[in-house]
Amino acid sequence: MIQWQHVKRLIPLIGVMMLTLTGCGKPYLSALDPKGPVAEMQLSLIKLSLYIMIGVVLVVAIIFTYVLIRYRKRPNQDGIPEQVEGSAKLEILWTVIPIILLIILAVPMVSQTFTLAKDYSGESDTVRVKVIAHQFWWEFEYPDLGIKTAQELYIPTGKKIQFEITSADVIHAFWVPALGGKIDANPGMVNKMWLEADEPGVYQGRCAELCGASHALMDFSVIAVSSGEFEDWVKEMKTPPTETVDADLAKQGEEFFNQSCITCHAVNGTGGNFGPDLSTFGDRQKIAGILEFNEENLERWLKDPQGVKPGNKMPNLNLNDEQISGLVEYLVNLKR
């Protein structure tokens, strides 16, 4: 009786959790809403596993219920019922059925594992991307195109993207739920995987391996565009800027950037690579991978980067308002 009262108290909590969890699964961040062939194959394996497990649970529950009713204690029944042991038919049945279920699960699992592990690096129609994970940002390099980006990964739809994934510091994991499952990014090691997007869109990517204080904020965006738009993007990225901004405030920001920031951040091929490349910073959709791109959030980031993303490698330079205004004006105008 006491146990049942405890169960009744848990029912409202379970109900709230179920209602809350139904909010999970946004289309750009859900493995249950696949947007590419890799995610579709992986979801089909998940469904197959679930169907088999649900079937086993139902059969066991039905047999358990039948036995409870069929062999319950009868009125006026005394003593221990007759014990029945050694049924060859039942032993064969519960040995063969699990083997059949394992075969049903193993055949597509092994087949699709080899399909997903295929290396498309040598195919001409494949886009190769090197992924380097850093605490706490992502670097993307297109070795065949001579392009580097940070935090935002552009890919063409309908083409296989072959990734070579590694880490510059600790163990991370590269994961774009809507396009496919994760793979570790290990320092000193290169792991390979391929993904493909069926339709244009912006898909959220995340680190899926606990990597430090701001692990939960280590996001990136995958921007899938048509082949024509991707070719235009490549041309724009490879075209050197013809001029910088003219405004005095932006000029002041550029001068301060070249004095204080250039050792960590590169712009148009000049500068260090300790932090993200900022060549096309003004075209980004997010700041630091998590903040909506606007001047107010950029000011917030420059004033207190540790407050926005704790533990990241961006130091607080204690900038005054004039320096922040100049940097904001300069950075938002770094566009293709």
Image: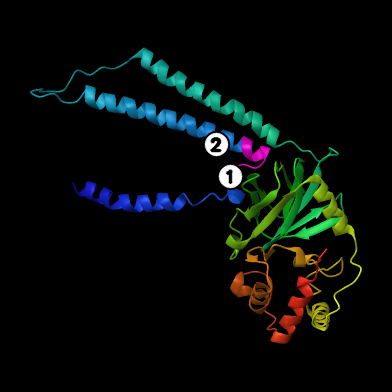
Q: In this view, does 24 lie above or below 324?
A: above
Instruction: Find residue 64 and report its image quarter.
Output: top left
Amino acid type shown at disc 1: Ala
**Secondary structure beneath label 2:** helix
Q: Residue at x 80, y 78 (%)?
A: 257
Q: Give the range drawn in magenta.
A: 34-41
Question: Residue 162 at what x, y percent from top left?
Answer: 76, 44
Residues at badges 2 and 1 in contact (C-beta under 8 Å)?
A: yes
Whether residue 216 is visible here, answered yes or no, is yes
Q: Residue, x 15% and y 23% (percent of image)?
A: 80
139, above or below 314, in the image: above
Q: Does the magenta stretch include residue 165?
A: no
* Quadrant showing the C terminus: bottom right
Q: Whole-percent x and y of residue 242?
A: 92, 68
Q: Name the residue under label 2.
A: 46
Which is more foreground, mark 2 or mark 1? 1
> Dot 2, crowdedness within 10 Å: few (<14), some or many (≥20)?
few
Q: Which mark is residue 218?
A: none
Q: Nearer the viewer, residue 289 or 83?
A: 289
Left or right, 174 with respect to 85, comes to right
Q: Position of residue 192 (x, y in %)?
A: 73, 44
Q: Which residue is drawn at 22% across and 50% down?
A: 5
**Does residue 132 appear anywhere in the picture?**
no
Determine if the magenta segment contains residue 37. Answer: yes
Which secondary structure type mostly characterizes the magenta part of the structure? Answer: helix
